[in-house]
Image (cartoon, helix red, strand yellow):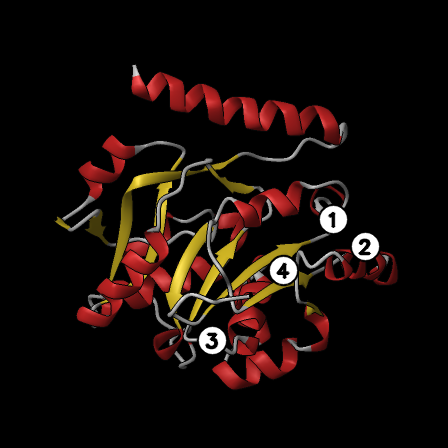
Amino acid sequence: MKFNENSVTFEIKVYENDWKFILTGDYLDKIIARCNYSFNYKILLINNVDDVEEVKKYAEKKINKGIINQYFVVDEYSNNALNYFNIEKNSFNDGYYYSIAELVGIYLCKTDYLLHFSSDSFLESKKVNWIDKAINIFKENEDVIVANPVWNFAYNEANNESIGIIEDFYVGYGFSDQCYLIRMDIFKNQIYNEKNIDSDRYPTYGGELFEKRIDSFMRNYKKLRITSKEISYVHKNFPKKNIKLFDKLYFGFIAFKRLKLLK
């Protein structure tokens, strides 16, 4: 396989309530294919599941089919990641399981950049090379450290929240763990113990969660996020059952949103 010039890892996490959606059928295959990118590594993070061995069996099937390269059980690396980033486990205040997979993924990442998807986030079907475009901006501007597609086709919202525009991206503050492309030269450092009053807008049930910590760091050090003007991801919660119906509704929703936007 010929990789892109930039060194990028694709990463997705699963937990007890969603691993069947991701690892049975071709849902994960579609998530990766829609990125339209030759990743150096495609990684699955297994976090907080009841039967680890069962989930591993399904993950192995994805490896055998060439969909992913490797999987990691988060619990096996969590202590090392916390020590590496100098984070106390009790500092999360109920946000540990919302945060530890992302931190382990960054700790284990071998490439210069990491593209992370939450399990219930999905790109629309559109061939846009937003990843390399974002990385080129990373290389030119040291203050830009995060990139993402726009969320749920909310282009007007992203524009209104922005403080400017660079090429095909809105520029602003903020961070979401639903989908992010990040620079390892920044995120491999001990940046996860910052606090900022503006970051208190994140859900209280998540405690001092990963995305809140990143948002605080970015605001404290005036680091920026760029959001694509060309492509959107959709974030939609999984139902408790009926995977096949959800798959149809999910892709139907994306098609509907795109059609409505074009009118």
Question: Which x, y percent locates residue 89?
Answer: 59, 74
Q: How many marks?
A: 4
- Asked if marks 1 and 2 touch (Cβ < 8 Å), the reply is yes
Which residue does the image show at 67% across and 27% down from the upper left?
Answer: 246
Q: Residue furthest top?
A: 263
| Residue for badge 4 | 97
For discs 2 and 4, the disc positioned in front in the rendered view:
2
Which residue does the image show at 77% across and 61% down from the upper left?
Answer: 64
The reply to whether residue 226 is in sight is: yes
For residue 175, above or below residue 239: below
Helix, strand or loop under label 3: loop
| Residue for badge 3 | 111
Which quadrant of the figure contains the N terminus?
bottom right
- On residue 23, the disc is 1
In space, the residues marked 2 and 4 are separated at their CA atoms by 22 Å
The reply to whether residue 196 is in sight is: no
Left or right, residue 116 beside residue 221? right
For residue 140, above or below residue 203: below
In space, the residues marked 3 and 4 are separated at their CA atoms by 25 Å
**Amino acid type at mark 1:** Leu
Ranked by sequence position, the earlier of labels 4 and 1 is 1
- On residue 58, the disc is 2
